[in-house]
Image (cartoon, grey):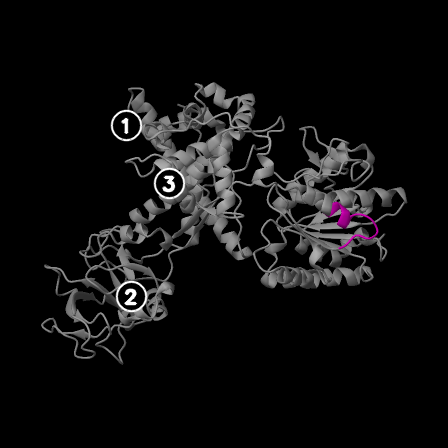
Amino acid sequence: MQPLIVSQQVTQGVADFLRTAFPSTTSGFEGLLERFLAERSNIFKGPYLTLPLPFRKQLSGGLPAFPWLPTSFVPHAHQAKAFARLAGSEAQSTLVATGTGSGKTECFLYPILEHCRVARAEGRRGIKAIVLYPMNALASDQSGRVAKEIVKAAGLSGIRAGLYVGDAPAIESPTVAQLSDGSYSVITDRNALRENPPDILLTNYKMLDFLLLRAADAPLWAHQQPDTLRYLVVDELHTFDGAQGTDLACLIRRLKGRLNAPPGQLVCVGTSATLGDDGVSDLLAFAGDVFGEVLDDSAIIAEDRESVGDYLAEALVEFTQSPHPCDVDVLAPENYNDLHAYLAAQAPLWFGEPCSVMQAEDFAWRCGLGKHLKSHFAFQNLLRDLERLGPKSVLLADLLVLLKRRLPNCDDERFALLWLSSLLSLVAHARQDAHQNFFLQVKVEIWLRELRRMVAVLDAEPQLRHHDDLRKADMERLHLPVIHCRECHATGWGSTQQKISPNQLTHDLQAFYSAFFAEDVSTRFIFPSSAGTNPAVFERKQVCPACGSLHQASQTECSHCEDQPLLAVDIASNLHEGTRNGAKYTKSHHDCPFCAGYKTLTIVGSQAASLAAVMVGQLFATRFNPDKKLIAFSDSVQDAAHRAGFLAARTWRMNLRPALAQVIADAYAAGRPVTLENLPTAFAHRWRTALGDGHYIATFCHRKCTGYVTTRP
C-alpha cells in the first residue's frame, strides 16, 4: 500500500460522498456542504505521518537468552528487557507497551516457552500459561505463531499448546504440528485438550469463564496445583476498558481463587500498541486493577528505537536529485492506471536511472532501492525534519510548510504534497532483506468526525456547524437542524412549534429529533421564502434569527426582542389525517412539500457506520492498495454485529459498481460497446473468467440471495 496517496483518496472519497448525498437546490443553501468541507477540521483531523526507525538491538553479545534459540537471533533491546523481567523464578508482572511489529508476542512467549520446557523436564503437568485474546480471529492467527516456534525449535519438543475458543475449529489437530499445506497448528481437538491438558492455553476471557464452570471441561484443571499456573497474558489490554474491564478483573480473581494461587504466584502480562497517553501512574493503576497485582514504575516495557543520528551514522550522501516543478504531471498518481507504472516513473526523478515496470516489481530491485534511499540527501533531510517536528506522529500540514520553504516555487499548489508522496511511495515499496521486511514502515493516521447533531444558523446564507462546537457567542443566533429532500434536494431547517408557544420556533435538538421520528404534529419544516410556493402547503412568515419568534409577512422587526432583521421563510407543517381503529388522528409526514416525494425528507448528517463504509470502499477500490486487508474494531459486541452487516451490504454495492464500469470501459476500448440488454452476460463472462465461480459468487452475489442461476455465455 501507498499510505499517503491512499489517505488522500480516502478523504477525497468521503468529501465527495457528502457532496453527492446532500446537494441543495434551495436558494441560500447552495454550496452548504462545500462551505463546510472547505474548513478541513470540520470533519478531518490529520493526516498524521510516522516513519518509525528500526528498533535498537541488544548491544551485549554472548549466548542467546534461552538455550533453544538459534545463535543468530539478536533480540531488540526492549525484548531483552522483557526477557530479563519475565524469565526465571523472580519473574514479575509486566506491561509491554511497544508499537505494531515490535515483537510484543516474543516478549512474553519466549519466557513462557522456557518455563514450560523446564517444567516438563521436571515432570510437572497442567496448564502453566493462559493467553487471553480479545477476538477469536486474533487468537487463531497467533496460535499459528506459537505452533511454529514449538515445531521449529528442537529443544521445545513435547511442549503442548492448545486453542480453545467459541468457534469450532476448521481442523481438529490432536498435536502441535506443521500441516500439509505448510501452516502450523496448535492442539484444537477439544477431547485431546481435556484428556491431556496443554502447557499453554490460548483462549478468550468469555471462554475461560465457561472453562471454569462447565463440568465437561473440568479435566482441563485436573493437574492444577497452586503453583502450576505461572503466567497470565492479556493481549491488547487497552480493549478491556469499562464494563468489559470489570468483567475481566472479576474473572482473574475467580481464576486465582479456583486454583488457590498464592500471592505473587501469577505473573501477569498486558500487551498493547496503544495503551494511551495517560500518565505512567494512571496506566499502572489501570493494569493493577485488572490483574489484582501491584506494578511498579519498572513494569512498563517501552519501545527503544534508533535515533536519526545513529541510523544515518554510516550513510553517505550519494544522491541529490529530486523532482522539479516541471515534473508535476509525472508526480500525479491519478495519471497512472497501475501502481508499478507509477513507481517506475518516480524512481528516475530521484536517482536519474531509468526504471521499467518489471524492475519495479522485482524484489531484488526493491532491496536495492532501500539502500539507495538511505544515501539520498532528501530522504535524510526528511528523517531529520520528522525528528525535529515531533517524537511520534507529525501533522502532514506542518511538514509541508517546511518543504515549501526549500522547494522551488510552483504554480501548482500540490507540488510539495506530490513531491513528498513520490518519495514516500518509494520508501513504502522498498525492502531490506530476503525476509521481505520493510525498509521503513510508512504510517499515516486520519481521524474522521461523524456528522451528528448538525445545525445551521437561521440566516440568508446558512453555515453548517457541529452543535457541540457552538460557543456562547454563537447562541445569540438561532441554530436549527438541517433537513434535505433526497429527490429534489430542497434544503431547509427543522424545528418544533409547541402549543404553549405557537408563534415561536424552538431550537431544542432532542425535542426536534423525538418529534421528527415520532411523526409528531409539532414538527415544522422551514425553507427560505421563494416565489411561486403553494399557499396550501406553505405558510409565509417572518422569523427572528435571534429568538425564533414568528411574525406576519408584512412585519420587518421582531416585536419580541427587537434585536435582528427578520428573515422571510415558508413553513410546512406536513400534517396528514388518517383513521386508526375508527378514530381520526393527525400526524406529521416526511413527504417533500416541493416535489411530493414519498418520505424523502431526511436530516442532514452521516454517522460513523456510513462514513466507515465509504472509507472501506475507497481502500478496496484504489489501485495503490494491492494488499487489500481490513481490521475494524468496535467498542461493543452489539456495535460490531451491526457494523459487520452494514459494511458487508455497502461493500457489495461498492464492488459491483466499479466492476460494471470496468466491463463497460473495456468493451468500449475494444470497439465493442455493450448494450444494456447484453451487459449481464458480458459481466458474468468477464468476472467469472477472471475470478472463478467461487470468488465470483462471493464477490458479487448479494448477501440476501439464497441461490444463483448458472448461465454460460
Label 3 – label 2 distance at C-alpha: 44 Å
Q: Earlier in the sequence, mark 3 or mark 2?
A: 3
| Numbered range of the magenta stretch | 82-92
Tell me the residue that label 2 is attached to.
480
Dot 1: what SS?
loop
Tell me the residue that label 1 is attached to.
675
Q: Nearer the viewer, residue 544 or 296?
A: 296
Please tell me in which quadrant of the rendered image residue 654 appears: top left
Q: Is residue 698 visible?
A: no
Please tell me in which quadrant of the rendered image residue 702 appears: top left
Tell me the residue that label 3 is attached to.
405
Which is more foreground, mark 1 or mark 3?
3
Q: Quadrant of the C terminus?
A: top left
- For the point 59% across and 63% down, the residue is 242
Q: Is residue 489 visible?
A: yes
Q: Nearer the viewer, residue 210 or 420?
A: 420
Which is more foreground, mark 1 or mark 2?
2
- For the point 31% across and 66% down, the residue is 519
In the picture, measured across the screen, residue 171 lies left or right of residue 711, that is right
Callout 2, which amino acid?
A: Leu
CB within 8 Å, label 3 to label 2: no
CB within 8 Å, label 1 to label 3: no
Q: Earlier in the sequence, mark 1 or mark 3?
A: 3
Callout 3, which amino acid?
A: Arg
Dot 3: what SS?
helix
Please tell me in which quadrant of the rendered image residue 440 appears: top right
Label 1 – label 2 distance at C-alpha: 48 Å
CB within 8 Å, label 1 to label 2: no
Q: Earlier in the sequence, mark 1 or mark 2?
A: 2
Provide residue 486's location: percent of width, then percent of height: 27, 52
Q: Is residue 273 above or below residue 316?
A: below
Q: For residue 86: magenta? A: yes
